[in-house]
Image (spheres, rainbow, N blue to C red):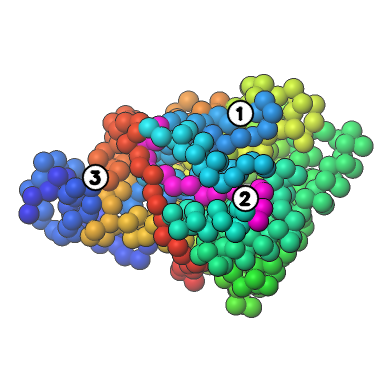
Amino acid sequence: MHFDTIIKNGTVFTASDTFRSDVGIRDGKIAALAAGLDDADEIIDATGLYVMPGGIDSHVHIAQPSGDGIVMADDFASGTLSAAFGGNTTILPFCLQEKGTTLRESLKDYHAKADGQCHIDVSFHLILSDPTAYVLGQELPALVEDGYTSLKVFMTYENLRLRDDQILDTLDCARRSGALVMVHCENEDAIRYLIGKHERNGDLAPKFHALSRPAAAEREATHRALSLAEIVDTSIVIVHVSNRQAMEEIERARKRGGKVAGETCPQYLLLTADDLDAAELEGAKFVCSPPPRDKESQIACWEGLQNGTFELFSSDHCPFRYEDEGGKLNEKGKRNFRWVPNGIPGVETRLPILFSEGVSKGRIDINRFVALSSTNHAKQYGLYPQKGTIAIGSDADIALWDPSKKVTITNDILHHGADYTPYEGLEVQGWPVRVILRGATIVDGEAFTGAAGQGAYLRRAKVGVVSQNR
């Protein structure tokens, strides 16, 4: 059999298996897994490298409306380029419904931003901020049938949060339509109360962002979200979990039979609230929600990655420039933490951090890495087995990793639109050295060999919560 490309002499890792095999690729698909393949237009020697599915980051914010005068640092061109250099071949960003608009209007605008700009494949979640009777009765069910099978609701941010009755209506519509609901769990009323106290006391520095969003506010909202899902009997994903208290709520819900998946992110493994107390306004670089916690919470999140509390490891990439009037240091943000845009960049560093801190340091094995970085995302959001695995018939989305390569993360080697990385100076071991999208090499070492517009939009299947490795 003749192939377009053969990857030879590497070790293949999936979420469940490890084996030596050549990989034969034809027409963008994996066509053969066998030893001794040798008839191809291109042969890639993967001696000493790990052959793994391309990463899937299912929690990414790109080109999203962010408030008056505030502009995200990444559009689809820069965001997908950065993702590719981080070993990813698919990302799932969020299409935000602004109040007063319909979902279809929002999708039309968001697709226009992405069309012709994507270096890797993309698929959109929906953010529901205005769940009117028309949206829930007409639009959402129709969009689910069109392959927009996941949506996100917020319990915080005054312009985005939904009341409990609105969340119940949304969950019920999702259950009937076959959509999966992601929930940002923080108690907005408690946060507004604490912000008010800090403002009255003149406590306006970035560190007070973390103090205004304590773990108890996340725990309470997590419990409430899980209770609402239990009332409606539907599946949910609790996103960007930062601490043990919220993790325990997930575990208790599962013991009651709840259908829930958990997600955590790099910032909760490496950063703490102390980073927001950096000199001058440097702490603004680390403002995100939920905020980083403490060393004990880092330990807890690692336990969750190891024991299956978390099926998903995502970046929550939400980039803003630091030295920018439209970013972290906008005029109001300089004076008060509440106006500092929430979010940090991380789509390019997600996988090297997990590989280095997890695999290289012996916290997780390589198969668990594949599950957390790719396979579980594909299964959770209706892309498997097209994506997320190395198997005959799957898309040839492959990342070749050098497990011994050491890299010091600095912003000048990254490809996002932000002017900083929260992981400046971190040395990691393990780095993607070649990235293949549907059979075509798009990253080769430090060179990008693909093209803008090469990425495709992916329609997704309906799927409930998928628990893996438990």
**Given this view, does label 3 or label 2 mark the residue nearer the observer?**
2
Could you say which quadrant of the image residue 284 lies in? top right
Tally of marks: 3
Q: Specify start and end residues of the magenta stretch as a single range.
A: 117-133
Residue under numbered circle 3: 439
**Given this view, does label 3 or label 1 mark the residue nearer the observer?**
1
| Kind of residue indicated by mark 2 | Leu
Q: Residue 66: x, y in percent?
A: 64, 34
Q: Please tell me whether mark 3 sits on a helix, a strand or a loop.
A: loop
Q: Which mark is residue 71?
A: 1
Figure check: 386 above or below 323: below
**Given this view, does label 1 or label 2 mark the residue nearer the observer?**
2
Residue found farthest to the right:
200
CA–CA distance between discs 3 and 1? 35 Å
Figure check: 50 above or below 247: above
Q: Residues within 10 Å of mark 3 (few under 14, many from 20)?
A: many
Figure check: 314 above or below 220: above
Q: Please tell me whether mark 2 sits on a helix, a strand or a loop.
A: loop
Q: Which mark is residue 128?
A: 2
Magenta stretch: dominant secondary structure: loop
